[in-house]
Image (cartoon, rainbow, N blue to C red):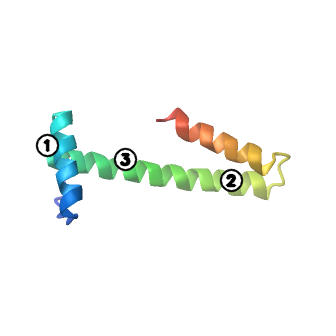
Amino acid sequence: MKRVTVNVDDEIGAEAEAIAEEQGVSVSQFYAEAVEAAIREHKRQQALQRIEDEVIGAGASVSREEFDEAQRNLRTDDS
């Protein structure tokens, strides 16, 4: 496991500590899970961009509005 040091504003740190306590996890675990979630979301956005590039670039008969709605639905399905 890699050890990292993170500096955050006092207010953010206090909120993180409070949420970690609410969830019954250590602050370290809370931050680790937050980083994991951010990485997953980043990869998801990259995948969506690749799909968009392929669909729109291929001249698909899907309107931009329909495509955007499908993306929103994908995002909310995982929430």
Circle 3: residue type: Ala
In the displayed structure image, the side of residue 72 where residue 24 appears, left or right: left
Q: Residues within 10 Å of mark 2 (few under 14, many from 20)?
A: some
Circle 1: residue type: Ser
State the image coordinates of residue 23 (x, y, percent, origin top left). Answer: 21, 34
Q: Are marks 2 and 1 in contact (CB under 8 Å)?
A: no
State the image coordinates of residue 41 (x, y, percent, origin top left). Answer: 45, 50
Residue 6 against residue 50 in the figure, above or below? below
Residue 2 against residue 69 in the figure, above or below? below
In front: 43, or 65?
Answer: 65
Query: What element does badge 3 sit on?
Result: helix
In the displayed structure image, the side of residue 58 where residue 23 appears, left or right: left
State the image coordinates of residue 70 (x, y, percent, origin top left). Answer: 67, 40
* Precedes in sequence: disc 1 or disc 3: 1
Distance between mark 1 and mark 3 Cα atoms:
16 Å
State the image coordinates of residue 71 (x, y, percent, origin top left). Answer: 63, 44
Mark 1 sits on what residue? 26
Query: What element does badge 1 sit on?
Result: loop
In front: 15, or 39?
Answer: 15
Distance between mark 2 and mark 1 Cα atoms:
39 Å
* Precedes in sequence: disc 3 or disc 2: 3
Residue 17 against residue 13 in the figure, above or below? above
Residue 49 lies in what quarter of the image? bottom right
Q: Residues within 10 Å of mark 3 (few under 14, many from 20)?
A: few
- Which residue: 28% across, 45% down? 33
- Which residue: 60% across, 50% down? 48
Distance between mark 3 and mark 2 Cα atoms:
22 Å
Mark 2 sits on what residue? 52
Circle 2: residue type: Glu
Mark 3 sits on what residue? 37
Residue furthest toward the front?
11
